[in-house]
Amino acid sequence: MSDRTSPFARDTTLHGDCDRRDAAWYIDKGVEWLLFLGGISAILFIIGIFAFITHEGMGFITTRFDAGEFFTTQYWTPSDEYDPEYGILAMLAGTASVTGLAMLTAIPFSLGAAIYIGEFAGERAREALKILVELLAAIPSVVWGFIGLSVMNPLLIALFDIPVGLNIVNAGILLGLMATPIMTSIAEDALKAVPDRYREAAEAMGATRWQVIYKVVLPAARNGLLGAVLLGVGRAFGETMVVLMATGHAINIPDSPFDAVRALTATIAAELGETTAGSDHWGALFTIGILLFVITFLINLSADLIVRGIRGK
Amino acid sequence: MVTQAPKIQVDNLTIRHGERVALRDVSLAIRPNEVFAIIGPANAGKSSFLKALNRMDLFTDKMEVAGRILFNGRDIRTLRNLYALRRRIGVVFPLPVGLPLTIYENVALGPKLAGVRERAELDAIVERCLRLAALWDEVKDRLNDYGSLLSGGQQQRLTIARALSQSPEVLILDEFSIAIDPITTMRIEDVLEQLRSELTIILASTSIQQARRLADRTAFFLDGRCIEIGDTEPLFEGGARDARTRRYLEGRFG
Amino acid sequence: MERFATTPLNRRNRRIQALLRGLFLLMTLLLILPVALILATLIVKGGPALTFDLLFSDPRLGMTAGGILPALLGTVWLVSLAMLAAAPLGVAAAIYLNEYAGDGWLTRLINLAIINLAGVPSIVHALFGVGAFVLFFGLGASILAASLTLAVMSLPVIIVTTREALAAVPMSYREACWTLGATRWQTIRRVVLPNAVPGILTGVILELSRSAGETAPIMFTGAAFFLPLLPQDVFDQTMALSLHLFVISTQVPGVPEPLPYAVALVLIGLVLMMNALSIGFRLWLRGSRRW
Ligand SMILES: Nc1ncnc2c1ncn2[C@@H]1O[C@H](COP(=O)(O)OP(=O)(O)O)[C@@H](O)[C@H]1O
Ligand SMILES: [Mg+2]
């Protein structure tokens, strides 16, 4: 390309050659490749997690594993030398009951908080309340577990006159509190996503704030709220330290909220250290891991699809 | 009149943004050292056209360009280093963009990236371009302030200084005056008057008066088509061949 | 205004509204209360044991006495290394997603992976760490393996916060830079990143504080119940504050009551301090925008 001479365009040396790729060109391409690798790392890690836990669990799955026994019996005696049994039904029940109770507390509270923060609070109060609710998420799970042991346990014993306070109620309440911040924040997003004109239209017809929320905003935010609940379920379901420390860790299909139970996650945490790599017990624990991975994957996937549904509109 | 090889020649240019067609089959040629105005209502395809000239389509999501663009006779799609093309084309946007760098860095950034290292040389470029953009006197004592914190009118002149910093062959201005005050607009028009003999200026504008004041030739775009191109004076004196152009110039349009 | 005179029905609605509003406020406050109660409990019960000696000496008598220095240092080691690994990778991923990727199927897949990575239970991360870093890559249970496990866990949050910081930089800055003939990378390095760094740091600090509290992922990958010696290099195991709290509150008999409270207080103090730092950073940031 020819350069025109002009009194103004004195410095055509700056233009460079349109046909020559300079260092900057190649650096840009190289960096793009590096960044691309970073970009797909999340995919690689998800695949990697699945691959590695499956790899460790495979020995068990291909030899000892029996789906019928695994999912429908409640006897878990992997360290029995002569007749180890691998039934996780009781742990499924334990995880489900604790998660269920957690949601029973977390859903009303997070929804109430989201409505107050999103629909009633003023600008400043909103910011402050959001930060304060987020603080719940800052407390490490092992501290929650410790609170379960040292505060909730004696409290429940005193309140309900039971011999031991490490049970579904204890862990459920703590898990509920832990799941609340994310649920509140997603629920508030969902409320915020409802266009103001809906509110204005309803208010113009003389509806009170609450009527607007109840009749207009909540139905319109339905999907986002469902997504919030699902994410909360995922959180509670996958939590480890609290259920390890506060449920009583007893293999037991509960028939009362004051029963001690054992959760899937807690079983892995409690037993992995005592098994030898490659043993059936080891493989069984990794198989539980696969199950946890698959279930949380499905929960998160559906939460995302539902939440994205509202954003897309 | 001597026929010169066109600075920029566009053949059958069609531009899409996803499904939406922004420009349909436009062909035109822009001569060296002329001021070429593109007028037309909003969404006529002016900005899309200007973006295609320095291959911004490569960096714009879903923007597709079909047809041929020759710069100094060379198809810009065959260039091995498109950054070298962009250094030859200065661009001024509708909204002023003072980069969040110091005023000095705003102007020196382009030359630095192009390889200028000498402080004295950079100083000279910065001063020359700020003077050309009629901003030097206002900012010469605070070159280390942030460019993004200047007033709108000053930022637009800073944008011009930046666009001139690599001594471009072509200066593109896309509705440069929509967000600034009339006084600054006048000052910038004066700047353009000074520059007109030095480089090729392509100007998109919704203000027909501005085109009339500045342009040697004017093209009228409407709904993605180039309706008419002509020398500015005759066109504005009622010499438009197309009825739509005449109606637009008389102000009886959207 | 007369047309809108208060009718009995209207009055009833207003009363319901006031009642519910109060109820929702109460619920919100009840969510804030636990944090205050927990802090108060820890301070009252653990405060007296929170001495200089606790922070700066080794555990003694089977961890029933002495201090927590090795655990404190271990946690610092673990989270620093984890961030050293996770931050560059996470920032790279965020830059790719925000600055390069369009919205094709690959981007959608990456987003999906990030969301799911964020939702993987921490104990599953631990299993991955054991299977991948400890066994497959032969790092053994070590500081390195535990840090890398934490790093994988931290990745999604770092990606998401970095992406937000990048997205907050106006598009017009990039375009202006491109028209100068800057490459994408030059634009990112000169204009985008400098303006996103404070936002990125906010996210990294927040994630740093979260990883400091994690227990499950480090349990089998490199953190040990008790070690008589400080680690010599990244291939040694280490004690960690979070695991130490678990151990002395569940596994060791005869621990004097205030000790676990004090350890919990140190852990939570560390985490909240970093949180506050990140919040303060965010506020300061808002005040120091350069556009
Ligand atoms: N980035 C974009 N994405 C989608 N559509 C666009 C984009 N830019 C422009 N368009 C569409 O292309 C048409 C032409 O727009 P534009 O080139 O900006 O015209 P003008 O500058 O004359 O107003 C318009 O219909 C506009 O909506
Ligand atoms: Mg335009």
Image (cartoon, rainbow, N blue to C red):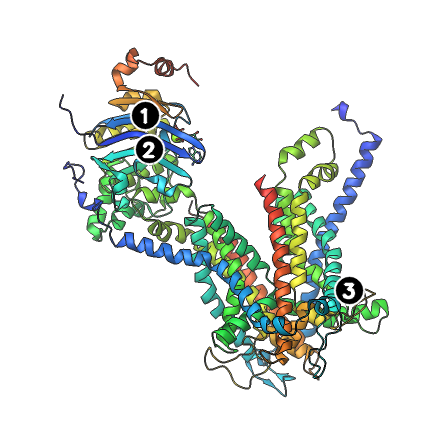
State whether residue C78 appears in this view: no
Residue A124 vs residue B115: left or right? right
- Indicate if the residue with disc 1 has its beta carbon within 8 Å of ligand 1: no
User: What residue is shown with label 2?
Assistant: B50
Q: Nearer the viewer, residue A277 or B48?
A: A277
- Indicate if the residue with disc 2 has its beta carbon within 8 Å of ligand 1: yes
Q: CA distance from mark 3 to mark 1?
A: 73 Å
Q: Position of residue C233 (x, y in %)?
A: 45, 80
Looking at the rendered structure, the secondary structure element under dot 2 is: helix
Compared to C261, does A115 lie above or below?
Answer: above
User: What residue is shown with label 1?
Assistant: B38
* Marked residue chain, label 2: B
Q: Amino acid at mark 3?
A: Val
Check residue A169 in the rendering and tell me which mark sits there, or answer none: 3
Evaluate whether label 2 is on the same chain as label 3.
Answer: no
Which of the 4 quarters of the picture holds residue A278? bottom right
The mark nearer the N terminus, 1 or 2, is 1
Looking at the rendered structure, the secondary structure element under dot 1 is: strand
Residue drawn at the location 32% of the way across and 30% of the way down: B13
Q: Amino acid at mark 2?
A: Leu
